[in-house]
Image: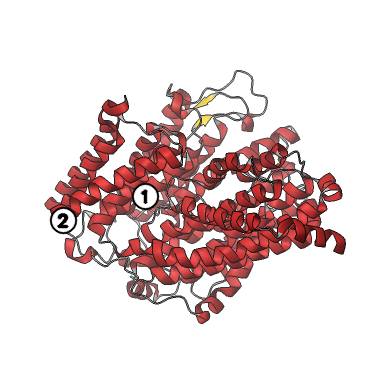
Amino acid sequence: MREIRIQDVLIGGSVVALALIGILVIIPSGIVSPGAVEIEALSPAFWPQVVLIGLAIAGGIILFQGFFPSATDCQDDDISEPTLALPVVIAKLIIAVTVLFSFYYAIDYVGIVLSSIVTLIILMLLGGERRPILLSLVAVILPVLLFYFFTYVANVPLPLGLFES
Amino acid sequence: MFENIADAFVLFLNWENIVAVFAGVLIGTVTGAIPGMTTPMGVALVLPFTFAMNPVTGILLLLGVYKGGLYGGSITAILIKAPGTPAAACTVLDGFPLSQKGDARKALDIALYASVFADFMSNLSLILMAGFLASFALKFGPPEFFTLIIFALTIIAGVSGDRLAMGVVSACLGLILATVGLDIIYGTERFVFNEYELMAGLNFIPVLIGLFALPEILNHFTRPQTDDLEANSLNGGPATFADFKRCFKSIFRGSVIGVVLGAIPGIGGAPAAFLSYSEAKRTSKNPQNFGKGELEGVAAAEAGNNGVAGATMIPLLALGVPGDVITAVILGAFMIHGLTPGPIMFQNNIDMIYAIFMGIMLSSAYLFIIGKLSIKYISKIADVPNRILYPVVLVLCTYGAYAVNNSLFDVLVMLLMGLIGFAMVRLNIPTAPFLIAFVLGPLLEDNFRQSLLLSGGEIGIFYRSPICMVFWALTALTLGMLVRSYFKKPASQSETKTATS
């Protein structure tokens, strides 16, 4: 008896659940259908419904494959690439994602240039760069160059937050 | 005719035209290489400068930007997995794995050779077959488009690896995301949830950058610092003539696909690139290598992408119908100079048409020179250690995503897509089908619904013409071959898989 593939069962189950939530909840609440649609296939909800049904079927197949894996499925476990210890990976990822979203929210307040400088410094430090001069040069020069390029060459005004005036 | 060609030579042979084509290709290459700076943006930025030029010079400058932009998108796609254009997203599939193996130089070389060859073929067909291809292209209505896109979508099976169901899940997610925005027929909201920024739908560029570049950046933090120093280095040698010869069949086929699809208004480079890639994989002796760093995959994608460049000018010049956004801008440039492309222009301003043809041919040569230079200099970024490169790429992507619509919302979309992409990579769900479905989805749905509108709901419209039947037959053939290969999987597959991993 082959072992159940837990990951496939979880993915398949989640996909089926997502598709059902989509069909039963998200489409009715998220798509505004006009009152009189003569041809059902022309309704704005028709295409998303078809896609979500396809999603549910594909999810069902993955679920089935998880419960009844074939011989090749059992053997195709990944050859893992060298990676850090799990707690370190999780900590680094949490920091990286927090920095990314803080960067996004900071753009409104302190502008894209300053927030880019801070983000670059933190992410390069997180990645292992320890040379302060190189780190500072890259962090300052790149955002300033990009700012001048987009503002004066491409004519794209960039958000400057506090420094807008 | 010879008198017209002589007049065209007089019109074309001046330093302004020669410089304009060069400047255009250079600007386009740089624009295409910056994630977020799209080719239409580049053409639109250059347009005001053409007002003061004579018509031929101005139009050649715009055409140069167009051609350079199509190629430039492949540079960052190969080096940092951030496609500069939607069409270059197909180049990522094999270009970036080659880069990771240390064969970035080879990938960039073959992308350039394929681009130049396809561009040349496209120009040649523009000159020789404008009339014939324009009349063929006019036979494509919504049902023909629909069946063509269905056929192009069979590539999802090809890029899903051994887990087709995972690929279908990924594609369905891409298709559903492509439906966000206002409905094209009724104008009602779909998944907008009162967020006005969602009304126009999700822009390609932030989604592409988020899906491909961000997972790679996040993945970088999960690896030990020691192994990322020379991951993308250009240690590998350049592409040889033998490499080009090996890929030639795919390059030629991709060029033809690009020319034919380019001549059809509204198709664009992305479907051509995906179809060419799909065909290359289907006919390859090593289909299992596609997606893992197959040179032929890069060649096919770039040939398909660049094959459309000259061909999109066919409906514009022959019929006055712009094939895509860029040719619409170029049509505007013609009109600003008091010219109306179409049959009348062939009668009244044939010397101008021939002069444009000459400039277009010159642009292929410039593309080669500028491409070679850009490989030499721009590709130095592959030597930058990843701990510096990835944060830099993130900032570059953020500026790029913002610049598409001057909207911070697009930056948020890019970040969220990055998280989704990262989760998909970690769960072994392929991201390529998501992208293909997201790019082709709107075309598929729009043409499906337009067909039904035309037929009053009669499904028979999808079988009405020989073109539809050909595409249905090709789709059935592909699916049949897929099913056959699935059931005939060799027992030693797992050994092969281990070896390739």
Using the image, name the chain to which the residue with label 2 belongs: A
Q: Nearer the viewer, mark 1 or mark 2?
A: 2
Q: Secondary structure at mark 1?
A: helix
Mark 1, residue position: A63
Using the image, name the chain to which the residue with label 1 belongs: A
**Residue placed farthest to the top in the image?**
A35
Along the viewing direction, whichever of A40 and B408 lies nearer the viewer = B408
Residue B431 percent across, percent down from the top left: 41, 52
Amino acid type at mark 1: Leu
Residue A62 is left or right of residue B302, and the answer is: left
Residue B142 percent across, percent down from the top left: 70, 42
Query: What residue appears at the point 34 percent right and 66 percent down from the top-left corner?
Result: B100
Residue B240 percent across, percent down from the top left: 48, 79
Query: What residue appears at the point 41 percent right and 40 percent down from the top-left corner?
Result: A150
Residue A84 percent across, percent down from the top left: 15, 58
User: Cα distance, mark 1 to mark 2?
Assistant: 40 Å
Can you see residue B168?
no
Residue A153 is left or right of residue B329, and the answer is: left
Q: Which mark is residue A128?
A: 2
Q: Looking at the image, is mark 1 or mark 2 earlier in the sequence? A: 1
Query: What residue appears at the point 24 percent right and 55 percent down from the top-left corner?
Result: B388
Query: What residue appears at the point 58 percent right and 51 percent down from the top-left corner?
Result: B66
- Whether pointer 1 and pointer 2 mark residues with C-beta atoms closer than 8 Å, the reply is no
Classify 10 Å Cα crowding around label 1: few (below 14), some (14-19), many (20 and above).
many
* Badges 1 and 2, same chain: yes
Amino acid type at mark 2: Gly
Classify 10 Å Cα crowding around label 2: few (below 14), some (14-19), many (20 and above).
some
